[in-house]
Amino acid sequence: MNQINHLFNNDLHAVNLGLESFTVGLQDTGAAVQHVNWQPPAGGDVELGRKLVHLLYDASMQQRIDAANSLAMERMLSAHPAWVGVSTAKEAIGLKSNQFLHAGPPIPYEKMCGPMQGAAVGAVLFENLATTPEEARALLESGGIEFAPCHHYHAVGPMAGIISPSMPVFLIRNQSGGNLAYTNINEGLGKVLRFGAYDEEVLTRLKWIRDVLAPTLALVVTEKDPIDIRAISAKALHMGDEGHNRNAAASALLFKVLTGRLLVSGLTQKQIADVLRFIDANDHFYLNLSMAASKAVLDTASGIEDCTVITTMARNGVEFGVRMSATGDTWFTAPAEYPKGLYFPGYSEKDAAPDLGDSSITETAGIGGFAMAAAPAIIGFVGGSSQDALKTTREMYKITLRRNMNYSLPAMDFDGVPIGIDALKVVDSGIAPVINTGIAHKNAGVGQVGAGIVRAPMACFIQAIKQYLSGFGKEVEK
Amino acid sequence: MNQINHLFNNDLHAVNLGLESFTVGLQDTGAAVQHVNWQPPAGGDVELGRKLVHLLYDASMQQRIDAANSLAMERMLSAHPAWVGVSTAKEAIGLKSNQFLHAGPPIPYEKMCGPMQGAAVGAVLFENLATTPEEARALLESGGIEFAPCHHYHAVGPMAGIISPSMPVFLIRNQSGGNLAYTNINEGLGKVLRFGAYDEEVLTRLKWIRDVLAPTLALVVTEKDPIDIRAISAKALHMGDEGHNRNAAASALLFKVLTGRLLVSGLTQKQIADVLRFIDANDHFYLNLSMAASKAVLDTASGIEDCTVITTMARNGVEFGVRMSATGDTWFTAPAEYPKGLYFPGYSEKDAAPDLGDSSITETAGIGGFAMAAAPAIIGFVGGSSQDALKTTREMYKITLRRNMNYSLPAMDFDGVPIGIDALKVVDSGIAPVINTGIAHKNAGVGQVGAGIVRAPMACFIQAIKQYLSGFGKEVEK
């Protein structure tokens, strides 16, 4: 008791680990306190923590992991994505007539969220597999459509991410590795398929994209005359974009390139004007290219033995799914969370669908939320300050392996974006990857209701590392 | 001696005023020292300082000044510049056939710097007033051309700023006040008239600008269908531009608007392609519009009795000139300084011309160097850090009257740019306005050799305030 009194009769100089609320309590009493933003490693799982310590202090195993991760980073940092053409999902990806792709990890139709089911209905109508929404739903409920994640076919799609066979796709080639990635075409804002809308306006626009926009772009973007997406993204990161929730600069830069090409294409002025007007009206036209470029970068790192680099983060509106290099095509999933953000007038959190879409591929490749320092203009969505934007990027350095100097950040004195999420670092530090995202209405057909940020669920990374450690077998158990 | 020893035997906690070098010396010895960035008011002029104190502590005079300055700020903050047309200097400004305008305060031909003389030679050739550079020089030396500052005709021109009668000009109207401002058309980089070049390539380009570009733009930019420059500048400040040394975003946004209009103009595809290719190739195409918009804003504040707002800062390559609202058209000049910055490969400070051009009108209107926080990408020109960009903007708050919420800064949590340079605040604080600028070669015809920053000479502001105080007569002398 004397010792307790001694303690409380002296000026306190405290260090607080973990819960920040204790810091506030101490500060209120006037005590000097230093908060350390600490969380128990391995999400507090003692058994996993024990194994992690083994792994992190075993020099020979560390060497194996470092070598594997270095190889992954070498491939990702030298990747050079370019837009090389326009095709259809049937042609380029090889989709069968009754096969649709969707965003995120695998999910059957009956378990999909509202916006994804709505987009599937729209795609059935678009493919002329039904003539009314009711017929379309009946077809979908009877299992008449075979679903697979976009990611199983080197493809990505924002929000619902529904890609059906006759939809046009952009082809993105990693010019240094040769691998291809695919994405659908951004429809703009308002009532659009990717948010689950499927009325006449949506279908008419999709048909115009298929019949006018895609063939026009196919004329001016080819393997012989590609558009350098890495270069445009690099410039855009100096112009307030982060490549996920803000694509105004990249869309404008792309507009300039396309205008130059279209004006010497031999097309009529009306055709050119129609196509450019559509692109001009959508500051997110570039988003799908940013996503497919990220996919082309990350596919180079997939399936490397011992490699703990995260190669996919994607959401289907029900589950968040993660894939890691060493464990290849295996998905590690957890329930999708609700983004925190700013809602459009008339909407609130209770209208939101859980986190949705493949667009988190941008964060997986080191842009989007990871490049928040490039885009202080979007921090307003989450009520933060411009300094918080820098803090977010700095925090992501702690869970990544390299700084990507191809994409530099003026506000960080031209340091590179954090790239190469290391699942071991995530689990060890308790820091989950940050993701900037649009927010969809939970019901099909309403559309976007806001934008904000969300964290990838820690549980996905813990599962990945558990499976990874089991692969090391006795080496870790010893 | 005992007291001295006492001093040096204790830990020093020093406050250092003025010269920062003393701080470094103390820090080196391990002493705790707080530097205060202080300079003697009124540039150390005791007599002026005395009068300033009188003025600053006289409530009734302060009331008069505040009322005058508030009126100026009300007009500047409500100004809404738009691009409303294209004409010629003869038509719009009323230039006579032997009359040229130039950048900065008044200067006769024989005293002009190399680049400005070169540009004058080029303009004589362009106007067909001579057929060889030698003839042109002879005409100029004989006084055959009448010169006046652009600023005397509501006009502004970057670098040499030579505007001759048949040159096309853009018309910028302040849509809330009705006043017009004029500027010539940006020629792009490399060998260009504004840097004093006048060879065949330069003249051919100027003729193309006159015969093709200007008439084309005149078709699509009219009083009936203006382009909102305030809106484009506001967007561009969220996209890494500061509106003086960086105009990449604004130029891209303007490109999109012009493309949309040209494609429905009825012009041939070749005409449209030629014009857009020229604009696309120049990330500073927007600079002249940014300048003329600034001029249209500042002209609303000119000639207000008692008003200490700076309405002009401009350089002719020999002198830096400043004008203040209350003293109307009177120029207060001092020798132009040499910008500090980054030189292009092969050039150094000894190649530089002194500070040149009307482009400092952007800083006078609160953008350019004053909006450095918007454009961390350009701080590299002066070897600073991204935090220095924020510091520069914060420093300019100290010598300005308002924050312009029409132009907000994401990196400053959407605070407005500092606007309304108060000559009293400049002289009282000893803080000179900062200016971002291109650097011209000192010889005619070489072109741009670098970019950097410079400070407006304090002597200009001291002269302005001296004349201002003399106007108050006995009131200040009492």
Image (spheres, coloured by chain):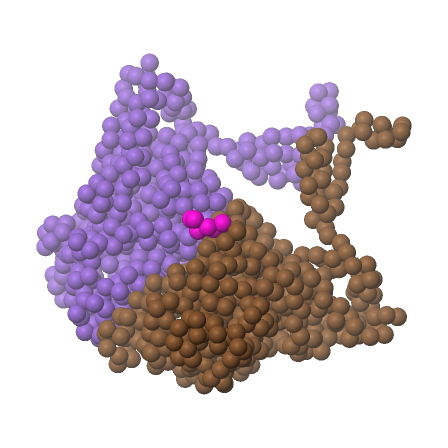
Chain colours: A purple, B brown
Q: Relative to A324, say whether B430 is above or below.
A: below
A311 horizontally vs A408: left or right: left
Q: Main secondary structure of the magenta part?
A: loop
In front here: A188 or B306? B306
Q: Is residue B171 above or below residue A7?
A: below
State the image quarter where residue A441 is shown.
Answer: bottom left
Image quadrant where residue B21 sits: top right
Q: Is residue A427 visible?
A: no
Q: Could you tell me residue A367's position as x and y percent?
A: 37, 46
How many labels, in total?
Answer: 0
> In the picture provided, is B75 more to the left or to the right than A259?
right
Magenta range = B343-348
The residue sitting at 40% across, 54% down in the picture is A241
Instruction: Relative to A374, say whether A49 is above or below.
Output: above
Residue displayed at 31% across by 49% down:
A230
* Residue shown at the point (40%, 24%) measured from the top left: A49
Quadrant containing the N terminus of chain A is: top right
Percent of width and height locating residue B124: 44, 76
- Say whether residue B289 is left or right of residue A148: right
Q: Nearer the viewer, residue A58 or B254?
A: B254
Do we see residue B9 in this rendering?
Answer: yes
